[in-house]
Image (cartoon, grey):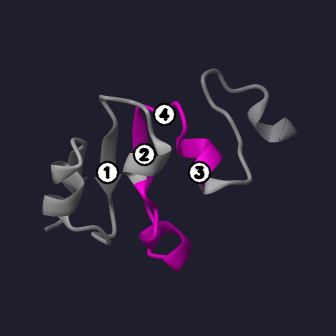
Amino acid sequence: KKEFSKLKNVNFSYSIQESIKGSHLVIIHTDWNDFKSINFKKISTSKNLKIYDMRNIFSPKKIKAQGFKYFGIGR
């Protein structure tokens, strides 16, 4: 999108999966079902992926068991 072209290190994507690929940080700020069903292990190849879950839609145990750094905000 044109609005993002002026921002450094920011990319726009129409797909959740495409936006996660190659990312080092994911911030979830919605509890929409599309986000609840993300399979990070299947999508991300990053060994250092950090997930900040502002809505606490994921189980910390399950996400951490997949090897990701998970932060549930407000738990």
Query: Which residue is farthest front?
Result: 42
Q: CA distance from mark 3 to mark 1?
A: 16 Å
Residue sitting nearer the eye, 8 or 53: 53
Residue under label 1: 52
Residue 35 on the magenta span: yes
**Residue type at the position of mark 2:** Val
- The residues bearing labels 4 and 3 have C-alpha atoms spaced at a distance of 10 Å
In this view, 61 is above or below 36: above
Q: Secondary structure at mark 4?
A: loop
The residue carrying mark 2 is 26
Q: Which mark is residue 19?
A: none
Quick one: label 4 or label 3, which is nearer the N terminus? Answer: 3
In the rendered structure, are the residues bearing label 4 and label 2 in contact, judged by CB atoms less than 8 Å apart? yes
Query: What whole-number distance in Å separates the C-alpha atoms at marks 2 and 1?
Result: 6 Å
Name which of mark 3 and mark 1 comes first in the sequence: 3
45 relative to 34, above or below = above
Circle 2 packing at 10 Å, graded few (<14), some (14-19), many (20+), is some
Q: Can you identify the residue that label 4 sits on?
A: 23
Mark 3 and mark 1 in contact? Answer it, CB < 8 Å.
no
Residue 23 position within the rendered picture, expressed as x and y whole percent measured from the top left: 48, 33
Secondary element at image label 2: strand
Magenta region: 17-39
Contact, mark 3 vs mark 2 (Cβ under 8 Å) = no
Which quarter of the picture shows residue 2?
top right
